[in-house]
Amino acid sequence: MGGLFWALGLLPGLWLAELGQAPPAPPAKPGPAAPAAQPKLPATNPADVELLPGPATLPVTGVFTLAFRLRGGVLDKYSEFPELDGFKKTGKTSTTTTRIVQGRRFSDLTITQRYVPYGEGEIVIKPFQLTVNGVLLRSKAAIVRVGPALPNPGSITKPVNPTAPLQAVGDLDKLFGKPKPVLYEERADHAFLAVVADRPRVFVGEGVRVGLYFYLKPEDQALLAFHDFTDQLPPLLHELHQPTAWQEPGPEPSVTPDTVRHLGQKYLRFRLAENLYYPLTAQPLRFPPLALTMVKFKLLKKPEPGQDNRLAGYKTYTAPGLAVAVQPLPQATPGGPVAVGRFELQEAISRTKFRVGESFTYTFGVAGQGNLAAVLAPTVAAWPGLDVYGPEVREEPAPGGGRKLFRYRLVARRPGVLPLDSLLHLTVFNPNTGRYNVLRPGLRPLVQGVVAAVEPLARPADDPFYGPALAGADTTMQPLDVYRDVRRYADWLLIGLAGVAAFGWWRAGRRA
């Protein structure tokens, strides 16, 4: 019996031994030789691709770069470099570097994208993504500080008087090494600075939009750049101020130009300043000549790959002065100040049925183009049996105008038609027609019901509770300093209680 168990225990071991040994392979039959397998190029690993950020600071005449480096691989495809706010794409370069390590040759490929700044200041580089051979590269946000052009004595000729009407061009020699000005050529540009008004003549109180713009042809973008814009702009804004006009600021200056047509030709228009003026007197609005200094580049006669191919200098552009005539308003009917603009009446009422003694709201307002600050709330004329409360003013401004509403709360004490058109009105002057318009309500609500009898107020002596209480009240006069005496007594009481507590604490200590 024991031999049987021994044999059964030996069977699993023999079975496992057979599984561990593979059967011998049959001999291979002779045949044609198989072609050798072609070695596959190794896939680009994330570590083989590196994103190279640009410099943190550079002059306005410098170049900002973004690049990626591919180590030991073959460039298949990559996505386009991003567009950066405040910069203009200029060109792209490719550099290959060969390294020999332990007898093996490695190649590094660097692709660089070049950007030219539009002007000085701090420019935020937003995060972007770049795909190289299927590898996704992510960049973090950064701030690039663009400063003034590099000072080089004897090479920069800044204008002595930026407001002078003459234009001057100076070279920035030795900016990139030691360039020879003879190798550069100056190309004519078609840019100009102008102060533009949307109309040559206005009435007193009528709005006129005046802006300072820099016009540039699209093909001249590589020739010019803004110079020291943050320091040049405040004096220009000060010169645009008018002491005899109500001024509303327009949109902020923008580095993104608008495409316009001037004299039938296409221009890029940069908005440097734009304001809306409402003359308060009949004196004309006078804007003096203004000057703006720009960086102008000379171009290399024979461009070389990988070089900037530009030589920076200065050029001053002058805008001629401008005057806007102001006409006085025609003789107006008496009634206070008049709003000037193209306004229309807007009115609303809170209900459709009106009862005596019930309050309702009536909204009277204007909407259109004009100075909303000059639109004053109309006064409601007195009317027997009508109580008027308000108004509540709500203003909804819009570019060059908007809407202004006056909300009144009315309570009618008598039945009948409520003549709102006779109770309030607003006089405005329309500059398009040159006439005064009187805006009156078109609603005449009908108040129904009967006049409620005015009951006299009940006397306190007739009240069942307060009458007997007032009759039996003590009429003795009380001194004015009674509360001060009560406070003094309370202070002495607290001091006494504190003394008793201290004495008890001292006796308890002695017994212990």
Image (cartoon, helix red, strand yellow):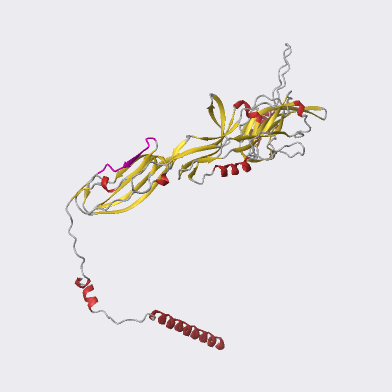
Whole-percent x, y for residue 123 in the image:
62, 39
- Point out the residue furthest to the front here: 331
Whole-percent x, y for residue 405 in the image:
36, 45
The vertical placement of 425 against 166, above or below, is: below
Q: For the image shown, how many numbered marks are present on the structure?
A: 0
Find residue 68 and report its image quarter: top right
Is 195 included in the stretch rendered in magenta?
A: no
State whether residue 451 appears in this view: yes
Q: Give the range drawn in magenta.
A: 432-443
Question: 319 and 235: which one is in front?
Answer: 319
Whole-percent x, y for residue 21 in the image:
70, 27
State whether residue 126 appears in this view: no
Question: 134 and 21: which one is in front?
Answer: 134
Find residue 163 and report its image quarter: top right
Whole-percent x, y for residue 476 in the image:
29, 82
Asked if residue 378 lies left or right of residue 109, the reply is: left
Find residue 156 and report its image quarter: top right
The vertical placement of 397 against 504, above or below, is: above
Position of the N terminus, as image quadrant, is: top right
Position of the C terminus, as image quadrant, is: bottom right
Is 435 included in the stretch rendered in magenta?
A: yes
Question: 41 and 273: which one is in front?
Answer: 273
The vertical placement of 448 against 147, above or below, is: below
Asked if residue 157 lies left or right of residue 390, the reply is: right
